[in-house]
Amino acid sequence: MLTVKDVNLHYGAAQALRGVNIQAEMGKITCVLGRNGVGKTSLLRAVTGQHPTSAGEIAFDGKTLDGMAPYARAKQGIGFVPQGREIFPLLTVRENLETGYAPLKRADRSIPDDIFNLFPVLRSMLSRRGGDLSGGQQQQLAIGRAMVTRPKIMVLDEPTEGIQPSIIKDIGRALQYLRDSTGMAILLVEQYLDFCRELADYVYIMDRGEIVHQGTAETLDTEEARRHLTV
């Protein structure tokens, strides 16, 4: 389980997170929703170690992550799919996937077949440069790269942003497969309400750097939840 407890985060004098508490359990998809600028990406930066927290504690699998560098968190089993994908445009698809070898022992450095079973298009494009792929294909590649690291938890920042509906469905099926077949924990930041409603086991809604609602996916249809999500 990933546990975020009473976490604050600042950018200079500006406070982005205010006493945030969330949990992401193994074998479940946990979705964090909210409008633009409410602190969702800051939460993932805190979890992955890309920005230091000002207070509170983040722990995974019984170990504190506080003060741990991003690469060390990857070795602990945290796989990250960043907003905007951030694949390497001049590297081939195969080379992009192989960058996921970094936290692995030499004996474990291989590309899992599950990646090609979930995203068959990547197998046919192994020799193509990442920058030549469509946005949806790049998103599949970013998820595949995270899978190469053999994560215990996968953290995704708005994976449906700017993606065509057919690939959104492929991504949804992939996340369900990873949850159900491997028992992986999945922490998903999204704005696409229907995507979370279909996938999530538990949801949190953020507003102004705070958690303002939490519950099962069914609670997204309540008046309270809609009030915090309506622009």
Image (tube, helix red, strand yellow):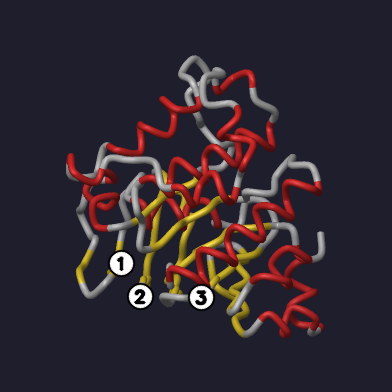
Residue 22 in the image, given as x and y percentages of width and height: 45, 74
- At 34% from the left edge and 53% from the top edge, which residue is drawn? 150
At x 81% / y 65%, what residue is drawn? 230
| Closest to the observer, 34 or 149 | 149
Badge 1, how many Cα within 10 Å: few under 14, some, many 20+? many
Label 3, residues with CA under 10 Å away: few <14, some 14-19, many ≥20: many
Q: Which residue is mark 2?
A: 1
- The mark that comes first in sequence, 2 or 3, is 2
Taking 87 as reference, is 77 above or below it? Answer: below
Give the left or right position of residue 183, taking residue 57 as reference: right
Disc 2 + disc 3, Cβ < 8 Å: no
Measuring 39% from the left and 43% from the top, which residue is drawn there? 12
Q: How many marks?
A: 3
Q: Nearer the viewer, mark 2 or mark 3?
A: 3
- Please state the horizontal and vertical placement of residue 133, each as a whole percent of the image: 65, 25
Residue placed furthest toward the top: 90
Q: Is residue 93 above or below residue 163?
A: above
Q: Sequence order check: which comes first, mark 2 or mark 1?
A: 2
* N-term mark: 1 or 3: 3
Q: Quadrant of residue 105?
A: top left
Judging by the rendered image, the residue that carries numbered circle 3 is 28
Query: For the residue marked with disc 2, what is the amino acid?
Result: Met
Report x, y in % for residue 143.
52, 46
- Give the label on residue 172, or none: none
Provide the residue designation for mark 1. 58
Foreground of the two, 39 or 208: 39
57 relative to 131 in the view: left or right: left
* CA distance separating discs 2 and 3: 10 Å
Amino acid on which the number 3 mark rests in the picture: Lys
Residue type at mark 1?
A: Ile
- Distance from Cα at disc 1 to Cα at disc 3: 18 Å
